[in-house]
Amino acid sequence: MEQGFIDILQKLIEEQGKEVLLNAANRKGFLADYTKNEFKKESRFLLQALNVGVQREIDASQELPICKKQQIRLLHEDHGMDENIAADVVDTLSFVLRGDTTKTEVQGRDNVPDNKTIQDQVAEEERLKKIERERQAAGVEQEKGEAEERERLAKEKAEREARAAEAQADQVARWRAKGRCPYCGGKLSLFTRKCETCERAERLAELRNMSLNDIYGNYGNTERAAKARVAGEEWRAQGLCSYCGGKLAIFTRKCKNCGRQMSY
């Protein structure tokens, strides 16, 4: 690393102590203050090594040469740092923390990494970060698309169920108006009121006494229920059956169409 950057590290340790590199949570801020936001590439590589804990291993090691090689291998193999840069960072930490001036030899290492090596390393890091950002953005878009698809399917299902319920309500209303079984539309026995097709008689008495308003309301069609209620009131005002609009017998006041007893 450049001598100017090493001098700044020595001044930082002299004024703040070694703890600023060993354990301080705000060492990034100290480094930015002392470098005055210069030496950005060197600061980035140094902080990467500090975050891994290289400085603590160097400060506590009894076998410094072996320790330095281990830390260089760690930075290179586990964290993707160029081997020459890793060696330079480790040697710099060894110098400012332990006063060690020896240079660790690695295969193909120059005494000082040239600017092209550092630039290539930075460019590779930026490329990997860009790939990660694009991958995350694609994941967000995929999740958004899946959520929209689930919402669309749920809406279509709700619309199908609403149409089916409306059709069922219409069918029940037509069968009931004709005095037929509200379950299947079959013919009802005159005396037992039991369906001759499906043989169901349960709830027929209840259904016979339900208005169109009630039937549509039970199926969740409030618009049809409101129209049925108006129609029932108009039929009643005309002296007709308020359930189906059929004519009433003069004496019994029963509907000639659906057979229901009227009280008016």
Image (cartoon, rainbow, N blue to C red):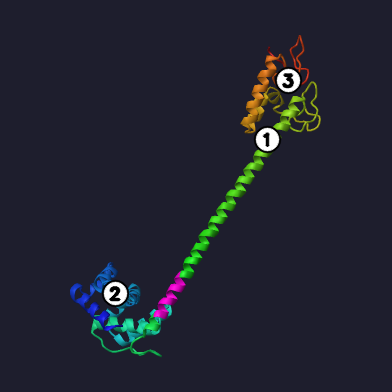
Q: Which of 189 and 58 is in front in this view?
A: 58
Spatial CA distance of label 1 from label 3 is: 21 Å
Q: Nearer the viewer, residue 184 or 108?
A: 108
> Up-down: is 18 above or below 135?
below
Q: Nearer the viewer, mark 3 or mark 2?
A: 2
Residue at numbered disc 3: 245
Q: Does the magenta stretch include residue 126?
A: yes
Q: Does the magenta stretch include residue 152?
A: no
Secondary structure under the numbered disc 1 in the rendered image: helix
The residue type indicated by label 2 comes to Glu
Residue at numbered disc 1: 166
Using a 10 Å C-alpha cutoff, classify the residue at mark 3 as few (fewer than 14 neighbours), some (14 to 19) or many (20 or more): many
Residue at numbered disc 2: 38
Using a 10 Å C-alpha cutoff, classify the residue at mark 2 as few (fewer than 14 neighbours), some (14 to 19) or many (20 or more): few
Q: Quadrant of residue 71?
A: bottom left
Residue at 35% x, 84% y is 87
Q: Position of residue 118 (x, y in %)?
A: 38, 81
Q: What stretch is highlighted in magenta?
A: 119-129
Using a 10 Å C-alpha cutoff, classify the residue at mark 1 as few (fewer than 14 neighbours), some (14 to 19) or many (20 or more): some
Q: Nearer the viewer, mark 2 or mark 1?
A: 2
> Up-down: is 146 above or below 44?
above
Q: Quadrant of residue 204?
A: top right
Choose the circle earlier in sequence order: 1 or 3.
Answer: 1
* Extreme residue toward the top, this view: 251
Spatial CA distance of label 2 from label 1 is: 74 Å
> Up-down: is 204 above or below 71?
above
Q: Where is residue 189 in the image (x, y as percent from the top left)?
A: 80, 24
The residue type indicated by label 1 comes to Glu
The residue type indicated by label 3 comes to Gly
Choose the circle earlier in sequence order: 3 or 2.
Answer: 2
Number of numbered tags placed on the structure image: 3
